[in-house]
Image (cartoon, coloured by chain):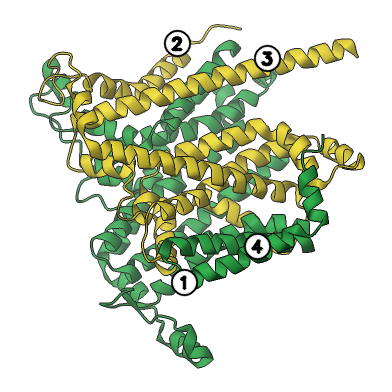
Amino acid sequence: MKKLSWFNATSLTLGFAFLYIPMIILVVFSFNGGRNVAIWGGFSTKWYGELFNDEKFLNAAFITLRVALATATLATILGTIAAYVLVRGGRFYGRSLFAGMTYAPLVMPDVILGLSLLLLFKVMFSQSGMLTVILAHTTFTMCYVSVVVSSRLVSFDKSLEEAASDLGASAFDTFISVTLPNIAPAVISGWLLAFTLSLDDLVIASFTTGPGATTLPIEIFSEVRRGVKPQINALSTIMIGIVTVGVLIFSILSKRQIAQRLRDEKRAEASA
Amino acid sequence: MRSTDAVEWAYARWLDLVLAAALALGGFLLLEHGSDGSHVTGGVMIAVAVFMGLYRISRRVAVIAVPYLWLLVFFLVPFVIVIKISLSDIALAMPPYTPTLDPAAGWSGFVDFLGKLDFDNFEFLTMDPLYYKAYLSSLKIAVLSTFLTLLVAYPMAYAMARAPEEWRGTLMMLVILPFWTSFLIRVYAWMGILGREGFLNSFLLWLGIIDEPLVILNTNIAVYIGIVYTYLPFMVLPIYATLEKLDGSLLEAAEDLGCSRLQAFWLVTAPLSVPGVVAGCFLVFIPTLGEFVIPSLLGGSDTLMIGKILYEEFFSNRDWPVASAVAVVLLLILVVPIVLFQRNQQKQAEAGK
């Protein structure tokens, strides 16, 4: 392979600088001891101390985490079934409507989804709260799960499932012991995607939330609307740190798994 | 491996229907007598009972029904409600619009209800310049920022595709990583940089390039920067995907036939990367049009974007009918690019086969 030309090297450097410098500045200034938010006033962790003393952030973080866990689990179940129905379900009445509905939330603006769900919840429930946020989040994240899982299902060899059912397994047994283990990586990525989307969402949550269910993005948004707050820098740093570590661990694990699979396949070929 | 022996045993003895009947009964009792929280439990119990009954009749139908009904209830029905409220008038009541449908009034009540719906809110949207200016300025911001994102993303994607193969995985991960970090935080990071006393101004003042702090935050420039920054990965990845697949021998052939490198780029690489560029443009343009967070954190009071207007119409003015009408019109505007995008994706999928 030839080396990068100066043009390509420059565009990569500038591009990644643009992507990462804002976050690096944010992280660095969360350790700023000075009163001015943009002038370095010595290293200090006082904003972290203030952050941890502020109960509303801890509460909001706890609520957000609970919502995201419930959402990711529900959305993974529903999204996996939706993908299975779309890829393996054959023709059925209203299939194109169903396909459209699993696709539309991906391209719909958050404000419209939030508004329409809020109007529905006003009819269904007397008060909004954590449950309504979970229902709303599940509805839009299950579509992402469905996309991830169906791309895996399409590439997965159908004859394995047919073999299982020829050998007498029921449809349910086939799904549990043949299909599910094979699509498991996609299901796990789907769960992670739904989890982060739910953690991240501000607009849909602020439409569908109620008293006692203020999520972390809503809390952050109402804090920073007026300007930069050092505590929020500290909070952002913690969140960026968690995500970075999580993504690194996940990518190392999946790399290892792929390497393991390649080794197994080679061994199987050699013994055959 | 039979993981479901116990289930099969129960199934053969019709125990599932017994359970379903119990669940349905319990659900109805909760709906009749319970408080708000147990209404939910009751609803869930009835839903499970219906599923179990359906499973008896047809397993396939039961499995299809689960995600289908969920999306009907939580996606399609809300839309019908939005359209209905957009045709209603604002009222000082709860719910704050009129007319409301009263199922007790029967068919004549329904006809009466239909007669009271009108297009006043849509007329209002055309009369008040605020709205059509907001739509136009959203379109302008979305188009321009999509173009700017393309300008930044293309060289990056190109360089990534040209990078040594062992780097590509890492480069890809570096592009995706910001996507996993909170959107809100990425937008917020720019508030600290672009503000009057922000990092950029302090830095430039310190360097002596400027004497007066630049006003960037709370202008449209900041909105453009925010959009390009947050949506960059959505543009880089599809372009990279097409460029990576590009057959290098085509470029060699072009150069052998006497093309300069620039000509080879324009005549071979650029046309072949069009599908990726189109996909990336849609992926940036569609969500940008309804964007709310970026204009409200980085934009100024004169930044008109329809997502922000809708939010404020609903939460500050509490005008549900007008907010719904704004949403309906935004959706109508979005239908064209969404359909075009889907066609493009299908064409690509077919070409890939």
Circle 3 marks a residue in which chain? A
- Subunit that carries the residue with mark 1: B
Pointer 2 and pointer 1: residues touching (CB < 8 Å)?
no
Residue A242 picture quarter = top left
Q: Which chain is green?
A: B
The amino acid at mark 1 is His
Residue that appears at 53% across and 64% down? B42
Same chain under badges 1 and 3? The reply is: no
Return the residue at label 1.
B33
Of labels 4 and 1, earlier in sequence is: 1
Judged from the image, the secondary structure of the residue bearing numbered disc 1 is helix
Chain (yellow):
A
Q: Nearer the viewer, mark 4 or mark 3?
A: 4
Q: Residues within 10 Å of mark 2 (few under 14, many from 20)?
A: few
Name the image quarter holding the C terminus of chain A. top right
Badge 3: residue crowd in 10 Å (few <14, some 14–19, many ≥20):
few
Q: Are marks 4 and 3 on the same chain?
A: no
Mark 3–mark 2 Cα distance, whole angstroms, equals: 34 Å
Which amino acid type corresponds to the residue marked 2 in the rendered image?
Trp
Q: Which residue is mark 4?
A: B49
Name the residue tied to disc 2: A6
Which-is-in-front pick, marks 2 and 1? 1
For label 3, the SS is helix
Q: Is residue B277 visible?
A: no
Residue B50's place in the image compared with B299, above or below, is below
Q: Within 10 Å of the Cα at label 4, are there few (<14), some (14-19), or many (20+) other Cα atoms?
A: many
Q: Please name the residue that numbered disc 3 is placed on.
A: A259
Q: Nearer the viewer, mark 1 or mark 3?
A: 1
